[in-house]
Amino acid sequence: MKYILLLAIVLLPFDAIATEYDSPLTEVISPPIDDLSNEKRNYPSSSNIEELISLQTPVKSQGRRGTCTMFTTIGALEHVLVRKGYYSASEIDLSEEYMEYIIMKDKQYEGSSTSRNFKAIYKFGFVHEKTWPYIGQKWPNVNDFAISKETCGHLVQKPVLLKSCLLGHRDPRLLDMSTKKLRSFDPQFIPIKSEAYDLRDRFLPELIKKRRSHKLKYLSSVKKLLLDGQAVIMGTKLYYGSWNSSKTTKLNIQKRDKEKFYQGIVTYPEKGTKDRRISGEKGGGHSIIIVGYDDEKVIRSRMQMEDGSWREFSYKGVYYFKNSWGTNGFGKKFKFKGKNYKGYGMISQKYAHEFGSFFQVN
């Protein structure tokens, strides 16, 4: 089967396709232990956010796919390569498409977890974006697009393999095929596989410590890593009203505050709010890259309660983060010290500590 790459789809402006898309919540959310009250944890009230942002690659968009954990995993890997001096932030661009493929090769449902992603990278490596460009379009069915039919149509009589192909955008059996078989089946995959293993063997042993789990147990570990110039990943349940996403209106949670969405401000789903109940029942999951904190920063929200009344809340303490919803929607007006960092945001520490799980990279 010859794989045909339809550049018209690959080159779509992802910000125009979608600026927000959540994924199924497959990460088991267990908040870290709060040990920050310990007198020995005498950390400064804020970290050097600008330094950590300078070590991040440009904000990307996941488009219409639930691939947020792929973007945070790849973004974190890029960050480590930049931090350790192998590349500059402007020259390294790794493939989320390949990351999604190596996860979905054995799955029939969308979503993943940070620890699972890094285990897959250790086994199957990673490639550059130019080697396998990202396709921001979801393929629900084999006949939805010419490229999905061309790529997965030969698997219509094999529903399990077909589902994995539609999710991963390529036949799920390729990594198990010999070079000889790939030459006749999908010759374009040969250089992809070769590059993935070459980069794995070249970088991974010294870049990322092989762990059973990358989850952080203590909140103090999150702050310590950020103060040391290391970004961390956070997986969390998505409360649409607190994010002011478009689903805030679609699910009749409350009137959406688009300005907060553009400013990248994420507050908190208070008990008794419609957001807490409706998003709790229908919300998906999301994954972001934490690049700093400020214990003194105050953000405010206005939330609709279950009885229809409105209440105002304020929250002291935020984490700053890099998102994967592009730069023309969420966070397009985000500013720090007067400088615009499009696609970034801030989330209340109350939200993060109650609903988030944190993961270290190396």
Image (cartoon, grey):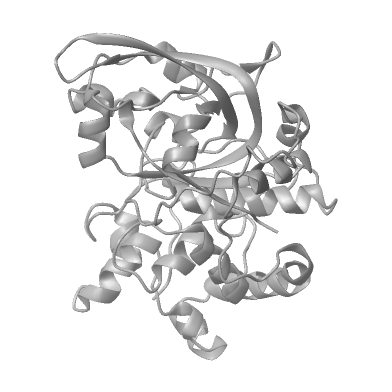
> Looking at the image, which residue sits at the far right?
85
Query: Which sits in the foreground, 323 or 134?
Result: 323
Please name whichever residue, 254 or 332, is drawn nearer the observer in this view of the structure. 254
Q: Can residue 13 be seen in this view?
A: no
From the viewer's perspective, tell me whether residue 332 is left or right of residue 160: right
Quarter of the picture containing the C terminus is: bottom right
Residue 161 falls in image quadrant: bottom left
Foreground of the two, 105 or 227: 227
At a point 54% along the width and 70% down the height, the residue shown is: 120
- At x 63%, y 25%, the residue is 295
Residue 82 x/y as whole percent: 78, 48
**Location of residue 71 in the rendering, given as x and y in whole percent from the top left corner:** 53, 48
Looking at the image, residue 155 sits to the left or right of residue 80; the answer is: left
Name above or below for residue 298 compared with residue 292: above
For this orientation, the residue located farthest to the front is 39
Residue 281 sits in which quadrant?
Answer: top left
Residue 246 position (above or below residue 210): above
Q: Quadrant of residue 279?
A: top left
Q: Can residue 357 be seen in this view?
A: yes
Q: Position of residue 282 (x, y in %)?
A: 22, 40
Number of on-image labels: 0
